[in-house]
Image (cartoon, rainbow, N blue to C red):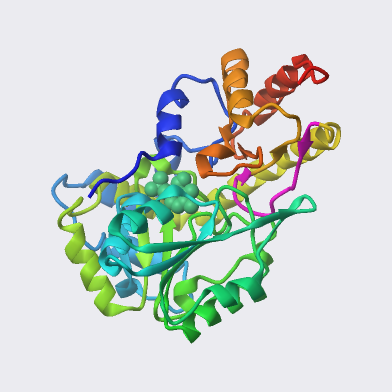
C-alpha cells in the first residue's frame, strides 16, 4: 500500500525544529514533565515510582481507560482502546472498516489522513467542503443530507475543525449524527480538539455517546497540549469493531508506552486545571489577533474561532500564500502553514494561537507585513 506524502508533516519536518516561532501549530503550549508529575496523586505517584518498563496491555492501562471513559457520558472503560497518538487510531480504524470501492464522505479541507488513507485503500472518497462566505465558515446541512446515501459506508468529521477552527452548533452536530444513523453509516468523529471550547456550554456531545456506529477519536496532544506522550484513543460501542482494532494493533505498536500511560493518567486526573490553562492562553492570544486583524483588513480576512487552537485566515493580496509563508519564515523565523498543504486554493493559511510566545511571534509577523510593499504586489 503506497500512501502519498503527508504534506503537513513534511513541511513541519523541514521547519519545526529550525524556526523560532511556531505560529501555525495546532497543539497548544505544552507542559514540562516535572509539572505533570507535581500534579500526581498518591496512587499515580506510586505507579510512576514503581513502574516496570515491560510491555503494557494492548487495550491500554485499565486505570487510564477508566479516566478516559469519564470524558464520555455513556461509554465505559470497555469501550475505550488506547493508541499511540490519534494518528495510529485513524490508520487502524480506516484499515479495519474499509475495503476497495467503499464510499467515504470526508469534510474538507481536512487533516490529510482522513482522506488519504481511505483513498489508498481504494475507497471512493467524496469531499464535502466547508464554505468560506462573508468572512466565516459554513457547513451546509441541507447539501450534506443529500450527499449521504445508503451507499455511504463511513463519514469522517472533525469538530472543532482543523484547519479552519470551525465549530458547528450542537443542533447541527445532532443532525449530522441523525443523517449517519438514517443511512446506517459509520461516523468517524475526530474530536481531538474537543474540550478546548472558550464557552464550555458550546461543547459538542461525543459522537460515541450518541450512536452505536460512531467512533470518537481523542488524544492527549491537542486540548491537553501533551503531544509528546503519543497517547490517543478510540471510544466506540461497536464490540466487533473494537475486536478488529485490537487485533490490528498487534501489527502496529502492540501496546502504548508505559511511562506515557501514567503521565496521561495524571493529566486526565487534573484535566480541569490543564484544559483551563490552555483555553486561557488561547483567549488572550485571540484578543491580540482580533486587534491586529481589525487594523489590517486590507491585507487579511479574519474569523475568530470559538474553540481549538487554530484559525484559517485569508491573505487578500495577490502574493500566493506559499510564497508569503516562505518569505516570512526566511525573514523572521515565524512559521505559518500555507493552506495549499490542505489543498486550499483561496490563499488561506493556518495560524496557531495556543503558544505563550504568540505576542512576540505576532510582532515579527507584523514587522514582516509592514515591510512588504503592498502597492507592488
Ligand atoms: C484533526 C486531527 N486529527 C488527528 C491528528 C493527529 O494527532 P496526533 O499527532 O496526536 O496523533 C491531528 C494532528 O494535527 C489533527 O489535527
Quadrant of res 321:
top right
The answer to whether residue 75 is above or below residue 321 is below
Residue situated furthest bottom in the rendering: 182
Residue 246 visible at all = yes
Q: Nearer the viewer, residue 317 or 203?
A: 317
The answer to whether residue 332 is above or below residue 238 is above
Dominant SS of magenta comes to: loop
Question: Looking at the image, which residue is at 49% across and 60% down?
Answer: 191
Q: Looking at the picture, how far across and down is residue 258, in whole percent?
A: 24, 48
Query: Does residue 199 appear left or right of residue 74 in this picture?
Result: right
Quadrant of res 35:
top left
Q: Looking at the picture, how far across and down is residue 6, in whole percent?
A: 39, 40
Q: Nearer the viewer, residue 38 or 83?
A: 83
Point out the stretch of residues depicted in magenta. Answer: 299-311
Residue 43 visible at all = no
Number of numbered callouts drawn: 0
Q: Is residue 300 magenta?
A: yes
Quadrant holding the C terminus:
top right
The answer to whether residue 151 is above or below residue 168 is below
Q: Looking at the picture, how far across and down is residue 214, in whole percent?
A: 42, 74
Query: Does residue 129 appear left or right of residue 6 in this picture?
Result: right
Q: Is residue 42 magenta?
A: no
Q: Nearer the viewer, residue 43 or 341?
A: 341
Question: Looking at the image, which residue is at 58% across and 29% down?
Answer: 322
Q: Looking at the picture, how far across and down is residue 1, in whole percent?
A: 22, 50
Amino acid at each position: 500500500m503506497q500512501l502519498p506524502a503527508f504534506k503537513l508533516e513534511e513541511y513541519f519536518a523541514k521547519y519545526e525544529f529550525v524556526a523560532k516561532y511556531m505560529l501555525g501549530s495546532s497543539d497548544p503550549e505544552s507542559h514540562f514533565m516535572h509539572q505533570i508529575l507535581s500534579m500526581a496523586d498518591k496512587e499515580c505517584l506510586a505507579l510512576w515510582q514503581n513502574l516496570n518498563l515491560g510491555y503494557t496491555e494492548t487495550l491500554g492501562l485499565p486505570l487510564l481507560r477508566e479516566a478516559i471513559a469519564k470524558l464520555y457520558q455513556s461509554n465505559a472503560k470497555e469501550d475505550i482502546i488506547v493508541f499511540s497518538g490519534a494518528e495510529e487510531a485513524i490508520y487502524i480504524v480506516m484499515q479495519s472498516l474499509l475495503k476497495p470501492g467503499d464510499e467515504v464522505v470526508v469534510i474538507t479541507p481536512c487533516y490529510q489522513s482522513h482522506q488519504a488513507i481511505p483513498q489508498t485503500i481504494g475507497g471512493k472518497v467524496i469531499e464535502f467542503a466547508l464554505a468560506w462566505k462573508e468572512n466565516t465558515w459554513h457547513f451546509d446541512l441541507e447539501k450534506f443530507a443529500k450527499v449521504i446515501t445508503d451507499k455511504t459506508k463511513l463519514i469522517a468529521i472533525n469538530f472543532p475543525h482543523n484547519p479552519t477552527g470551525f465549530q458547528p452548533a450542537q443542533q447541527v452536530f445532532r443532525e449530522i449524527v441523525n443523517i449517519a444513523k438514517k443511512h446506517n453509516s459509520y461516523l468517524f468523529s475526530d474530536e481531538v480538539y474537543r474540550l478546548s471550547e472558550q464557552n464550555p456550554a458550546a461543547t459538542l456531545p461525543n459522537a460515541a455517546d450518541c450512536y452505536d456506529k460512531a467512533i470518537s477519536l481523542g488524544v492527549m496532544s491537542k486540548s491537553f497540549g501533551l503531544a509528546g506522550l503519543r497517547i490517543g484513543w478510540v471510544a466506540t460501542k461497536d464490540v466487533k469493531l473494537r475486536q478488529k482494532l485490537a487485533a490490528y494493533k498487534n501489527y502496529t505498536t502492540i501496546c502504548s508506552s508505559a511511562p506515557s500511560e501514567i503521565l496521561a493518567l495524571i493529566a486526565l486526573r487534573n484535566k480541569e486545571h490543564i484544559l483551563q490553562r490552555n483555553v486561557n492562553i488561547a483567549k488572550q492570544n485571540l484578543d491580540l489577533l482580533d486587534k491586529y486583524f481589525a487594523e489590517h483588513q486590507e491585507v487579511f480576512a479574519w474569523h475568530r474561532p470559538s474553540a481549538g487552537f487554530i484559525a484559517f485566515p485569508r491573505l487578500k493580496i495577490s502574493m500566493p500564500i506559499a510564497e508569503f509563508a516562505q518569505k516570512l519564515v526566511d525573514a523572521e523565523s515565524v512559521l505559518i502553514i500555507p493552506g495549499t498543504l490542505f489543498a486550499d486554493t483561496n490563499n488561506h493559511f493556518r495560524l496557531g494561537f495556543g503558544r505563550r510566545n504568540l505576542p512576540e511571534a505576532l510582532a515579527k509577523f507584523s514587522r514582516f507585513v509592514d515591510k512588504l510593499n503592498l502597492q507592488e504586489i
